[in-house]
């Protein structure tokens, strides 16, 4: 196979390997087989056009025409002339398919079904990227920029996927790109003759030259390894409290689409409740007269797999000016519009925006997206709540018990999505739910019975030290142990409600905070909370509070007692930064009704702690300082390495001047040409040897410094040239004047002396000659070239080559030692 054919094949393979990143987005994956076949035809058309040969633009045009014909044959055959020639009707059909595909992308969560529109979008994108890669890498013979379209294809796929196997698709895509680079390198070398792989060992058992191809493979594999391992390192991170550990960008694009992925907020919620010192993360000012219902909702968890609840993958859109009315809310339900201004603390970095539910409008600056199903706002790639101040207009919905009791059945779409329970859920959950709600006449009465069972009559205890639990038996264990915190209570009630046919989900956010002296409301980390939301047609998603001693009991779940005046509805649960009450503890005879009305003492005492927290721990400051220093120092490493190497090389010239007459080519007994050869080999590693060949090594080091200096200014070294011809090339390409040219030729003459003269002599002042050449190159170069020569010198790549050579030498040394040990005689003598 010729080099050009091999490069064509590798370009198609690289595109196909990068396309594998799209596999998690669409199912089934049969589209990949079709895309591979069409990509092969496209590449074959390009190979045939180049073999004719056609001009480069004509080659690209032929490939584009073949691609269009294939797409027409597959997707618009009935609308084309003779089934393959696209006309106006075929173009319109393509537009309709693309529009349908865009609608399907917005409608379905990942993985989306393989509709005709989505199939056209995916296969068309793969063929378009394949055409770009083939054009750059094969037609124009420049494989390096071909990585850009491959990166674009992978980045779009990685941005939309859930991240479960991103490392695998990155490895596949990166391997394809490295194969493409390797094929292009071999194709270039083949133009000069046969490509040699390099001998394993030189004369005398010393390591032979390492082939460039082999070194390239090593560098490529090392780069892949670093790219995969670095993200796994335990680098320090700033935690943002509740849900702060999610930490990933969740949207893509410019605000018109994208998806959000599932997260598991349970552990971070528990950690927020168990902080040693409460920290105020949100400060509210609202025109609501009663803050007992001022729950700040962050996200809803509506996907239940039997083990835990998590947010479903949802389509997100641009934030509308006015939010639509909440699902299921009828006009006869009492509501009041309230306005709340919320200020987030600088240290509270949250991807989701805490808001009262249901919101009807938000005023906030930054990159935010809207998720219509949960009516939530989510930051777009790096946007979070830290230091943000925003205003939310929301509805305070106050249904009556009669309206909830008279609610008709929920729509089929709601029942289908929100009453689903997995087969792994223990049967005891449904059995106990039916037992608790026995005698209830409707869904509302069942919900109230479930709430009362957990909050009042069931004997449950609130304890934040209990583990969240995992596995299908977690809810069953909680029902048996009767100890837990808001996560356990909300999860168990929502799961039970679903088994009874009541649509249910779990909301995560903050319970009402504490009223301050200036009229504001402070919400702390210890106000983090989770509660169930049940759906009733005509009212919509309705909050319930099964967690004892937390939050407030909704008024629509408290029964009216004839002739008895109910006490005033209690305020929100006291935050940890509020002063403890001096009232005595309630007696053990506190009635169930008083417990429900929150008239009994808290089951757990709330201790006093200051606001604001104790600042950032010292170890985090130290970690970030070290990380920042490393980030600043890393780009400077090539410059520092180059300065050190220049200083060492030029200093070695002083030894050359002091050496006088250099040892001849037979200066070492029995070495023959070995002295000069060993000196040259030592300089290749920039390690001038000591002894007879040291002076020769110093001269060669100065020559290497001169050629590297020219390289830094854009004159690449050519190892195939003799020193004299290399010097002439540097003078000619660099446009050096007569004085600088004499300096270059003087250093080249000294190199010829130490390599070829029978009796080499030492030349003094070679270091000054290199400095003269460097000054002349700086004078001829523009300011960008001068800056690059200092900050990012091209010759610094020798550091990587040195490491590769050292590693090869080390492996050879250890291999020889182990071989010698294995062959060492045992010391026993024969009889």
Image (spheres, grey):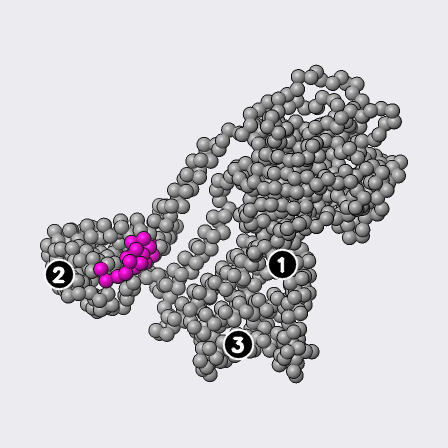
Q: Earlier in the sequence, mark 3 or mark 1?
A: 1
Residue appearing at x 56%, y 73% in the figure = 40
**Of marks 3 and 2, the one in the foreground:** 3
- Circle on res. 640: none
Name the residue that disc number 2 marks. 760
Work out whether residue 718 can be spotted: yes
- Circle on res. 63: 3
Residue 599 sits in which quadrant? Answer: top right
- Circle on res. 25: 1
Which residue range is magenta in the image?
Answer: 779-799
Spot the residue most to the left: 660
Q: Secondary structure at mark 2?
A: loop
Residue 794 covered by magenta stretch:
yes
Q: Secondary structure at mark 3?
A: helix
Residue 515 sits in which quadrant? Answer: top right
Residue 558 sits in which quadrant? Answer: top right
Q: Earlier in the sequence, mark 1 or mark 2?
A: 1
> Compared with residue 741, is residue 444 higher up or lower down, i.e. above or below?
above
User: Which is more toward the observer, 611 or 480?
Assistant: 611
Residue 475 covered by magenta stretch:
no
**Of marks 1 and 2, the one in the foreground:** 1
């Amino acid at each position: 196979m010729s080099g050009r054919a091999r490069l064509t094949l590798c370009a198609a393979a690289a595109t196909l390997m990068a396309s594998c990143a799209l596999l998690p987005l669409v199912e089934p994956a049969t589209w990949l087989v079709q895309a591979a076949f069409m990509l092969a035809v496209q590449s074959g058309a390009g190979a045939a056009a180049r073999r004719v040969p056609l001009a480069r633009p004509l080659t690209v045009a032929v490939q584009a025409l073949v691609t269009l014909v294939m797409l027409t044959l597959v997707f618009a055959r009935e609308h084309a002339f003779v089934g393959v020639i696209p006309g106006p009707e075929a173009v319109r059909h393509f537009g309709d398919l693309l529009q349908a595909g865009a609608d399907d992308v917005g409608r379905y969560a990942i993985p989306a079904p393989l509709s005709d529109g989505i199939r056209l979008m995916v296969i068309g994108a793969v063929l378009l990227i394949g055409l770009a890669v083939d054009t750059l890498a094969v037609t124009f013979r420049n494989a390096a920029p071909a990585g850009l379209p491959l990166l674009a294809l992978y980045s779009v796929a990685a941005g939309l996927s859930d991240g479960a196997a991103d490392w695998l698709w990155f490895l596949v895509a990166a391997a394809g790109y490295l194969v493409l680079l390797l094929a292009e390198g071999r194709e270039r070398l083949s133009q000069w003759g046969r490509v040699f792989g390099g001998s394993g060992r030189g004369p005398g058992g010393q390591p032979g030259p390492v082939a460039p191809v082999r070194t390239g493979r090593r560098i490529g594999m090392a780069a892949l390894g670093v790219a995969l391992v670095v993200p796994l390192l335990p680098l320090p991170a700033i935690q943002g409290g509740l849900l702060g550990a999610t930490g990933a960008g969740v949207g893509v694009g410019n605000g018109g689409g994208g998806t959000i992925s599932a997260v598991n907020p349970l552990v971070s919620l528990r950690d927020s409740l168990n902080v040693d010192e409460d920290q105020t993360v949100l400060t509210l000012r609202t025109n609501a007269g009663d803050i007992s219902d001022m729950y700040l909702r962050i996200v809803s968890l509506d996907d239940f797999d039997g083990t835990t609840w998590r947010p479903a993958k949802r389509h997100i859109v641009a934030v509308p000016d006015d939010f639509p009315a909440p699902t299921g809310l009828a006009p006869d339900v009492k509501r009041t519009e309230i306005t709340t201004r919320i200020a987030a603390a600088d240290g509270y970095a949250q991807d989701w925006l805490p808001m009262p539910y249901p919101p009807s409008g938000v005023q906030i600056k930054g990159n935010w997206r809207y998720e219509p199903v949960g009516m939530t706002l989510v930051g777009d790639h790096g946007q979070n709540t830290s230091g943000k101040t925003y205003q939310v207009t929301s509805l305070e919905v106050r249904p009556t018990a009669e309206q909830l009791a008279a609610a008709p059945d929920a729509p089929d779409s709601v029942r289908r999505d929100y009453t689903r329970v997995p087969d792994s859920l223990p049967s005891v959950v449904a059995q106990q739910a039916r037992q608790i709600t026995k005698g209830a006449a409707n869904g509302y009465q069942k919900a109230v019975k479930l709430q009362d069972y957990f909050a009042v009559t069931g004997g449950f205890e609130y304890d934040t030290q209990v583990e969240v639990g995992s596995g299908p038996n977690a809810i069953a264990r909680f029902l048996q142990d009767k100890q837990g915190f808001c996560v356990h209570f909300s999860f168990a009630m929502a799961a039970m409600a679903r088994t009874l046919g009541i649509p249910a989900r779990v909301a995560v956010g903050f319970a009402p905070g504490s009223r301050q002296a200036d009229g504001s409301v402070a919400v702390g980390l210890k106000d983090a909370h989770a509660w169930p939301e049940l759906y009733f047609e005509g009212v919509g998603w309705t909050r319930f509070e099964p967690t004892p001693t937390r939050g407030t009991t909704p008024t629509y779940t408290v029964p009216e007692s004839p002739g008895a005046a109910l006490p005033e509805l209690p305020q929100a649960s006291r935050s940890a930064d509020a002063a403890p009450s001096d009232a005595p503890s309630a007696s053990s005879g506190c009635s169930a009704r008083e417990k429900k009305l929150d008239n009994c003492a808290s089951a757990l005492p709330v201790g006093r702690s200051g606001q604001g927290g104790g600042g950032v721990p010292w170890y985090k400051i130290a970690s970030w300082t070290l990380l920042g220093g490393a980030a600043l120092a890393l780009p400077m490493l090539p410059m520092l390495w180059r300065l050190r190497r220049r200083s060492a090389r030029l200093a070695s010239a002083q030894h050359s001047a002091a050496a006088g007459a250099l040892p001849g080519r037979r200066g070492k007994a029995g070495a023959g040409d070995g002295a000069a050869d060993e000196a040259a080999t030592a300089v290749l590693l920039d390690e001038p040897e000591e002894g007879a060949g040291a002076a020769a090594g110093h001269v060669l080091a100065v020559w290497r410094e001169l050629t590297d200096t020219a390289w830094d200014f854009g004159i690449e070294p050519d190892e195939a040239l003799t020193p004299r011809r290399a010097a002439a090339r540097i003078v000619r390409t660099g446009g050096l004047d007569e004085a600088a040219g004499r300096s270059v030729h003087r250093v080249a003459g000294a190199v010829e002396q130490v390599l070829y003269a029978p009796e080499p002599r030492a030349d003094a002042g070679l270091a000054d000659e290199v400095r003269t050449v460097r000054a002349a190159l700086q004078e001829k170069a523009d300011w960008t070239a001068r800056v690059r020569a200092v900050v990012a010198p091209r010759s610094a790549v020798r550091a990587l080559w040195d490491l590769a050579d050292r590693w090869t030498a080390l492996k050879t040394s250890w291999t020889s030692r182990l071989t010698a040990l294995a062959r060492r005689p045992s010391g026993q003598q024969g009889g």
